[in-house]
């Protein structure tokens, strides 16, 4: 499963806020238990090992996802929490796309 999302990194770990907290449009690929980030679809197709800003894929095992009802500045936003305490917000284009992501991420 894959698609464009707008991402904000909130927490690097349970106690450490992310340094770069801006919203970035990226291309996200979910494969097996891994979430991988790319600059755009073209760069993913051209080089699947060339991640956005050299970020390692994140392991979804032991993590969780839910609609970010507490985040009210943007619509269609869901949150992914990783086992290591890191948290990301993702904005989808509509609620349907958001539901597709959360259901797929949740079964990892
Ligand atoms: C961040 C950017 C984000 C904002 C974040 C800022 O600044 O404005 O949009 O989050 O606020 O730090 P920069 O682009 O200079 O990195 P929100 O959109 O959620 O307000 P935060 O640090 O309070 O999370």
Image (spheres, rainbow, N blue to C red):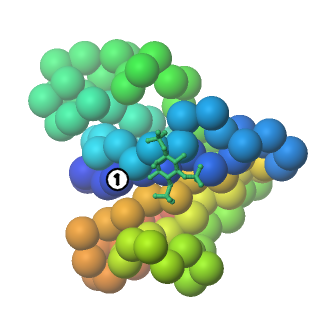
Is 41 displayed left or right of 28 in the figure? left
How packed mark 1 is, by other alpha carbons closer than 10 Å (few <14, some 14-19, many 20 or more), is: some
Q: Quadrant of residue 63?
A: bottom right
For residue 67, say whether it is visible. Answer: no
Q: Is residue 46 left or right of residue 54?
A: left
The residue sitting at the right extreme is 15
Q: Relative to residue 100, is residue 17 depicted above or below? A: above
Residue 32: percent from left, percent from top: 50, 45
In the image, farthest residue toward the left: 42
Label 1, on which residue?
6
Question: Which residue is at the front of the view, 2 or 92?
Answer: 92
Task: Assign a secondary structure to mark 1.
Answer: strand
Q: Is residue 14 above or below residue 18?
A: below
User: Relative to residue 25, is residue 55 depicted above or below?
Assistant: above
Visible residue check, residue 41:
yes
Q: How many marks?
A: 1
Ligand 1 within 8 Å of disc 1? The answer is no
Could you tell me residue 61's position as x and y percent? 69, 50
**Quarter occupied by the C terminus:** bottom right
The residue at the point 29 percent across, 45 percent down is 25
Q: Quadrant of the N terminus?
A: bottom left
Q: Residue, x 24% and y 69% (percent of image)?
A: 93
Residue drawn at 57 percent across, 64 percent down: 79
| Nearer to the camera, 8 or 108 | 8
Locate residue 98, reporting x and y percent. Answer: 37, 73
Please provide percent x and percent y for residue 70: 61, 79
């Amino acid at each position: 499963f894959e698609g464009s999302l707008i991402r904000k990194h909130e927490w690097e770990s349970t106690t450490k806020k992310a340094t770069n907290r801006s919203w970035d449009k990226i291309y996200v690929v979910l494969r097996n238990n891994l979430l991988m980030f790319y600059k755009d679809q073209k760069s993913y197709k051209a080089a699947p090992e060339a991640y956005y800003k050299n970020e390692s894929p994140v392991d979804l095992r032991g993590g969780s996802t839910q609609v970010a009802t507490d985040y009210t500045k943007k619509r269609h936003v869901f949150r992914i929490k990783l086992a290591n305490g890191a948290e990301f917000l993702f904005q989808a284009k509509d609620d349907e796309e958001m539901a597709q992501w959360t259901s797929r991420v949740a079964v990892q």
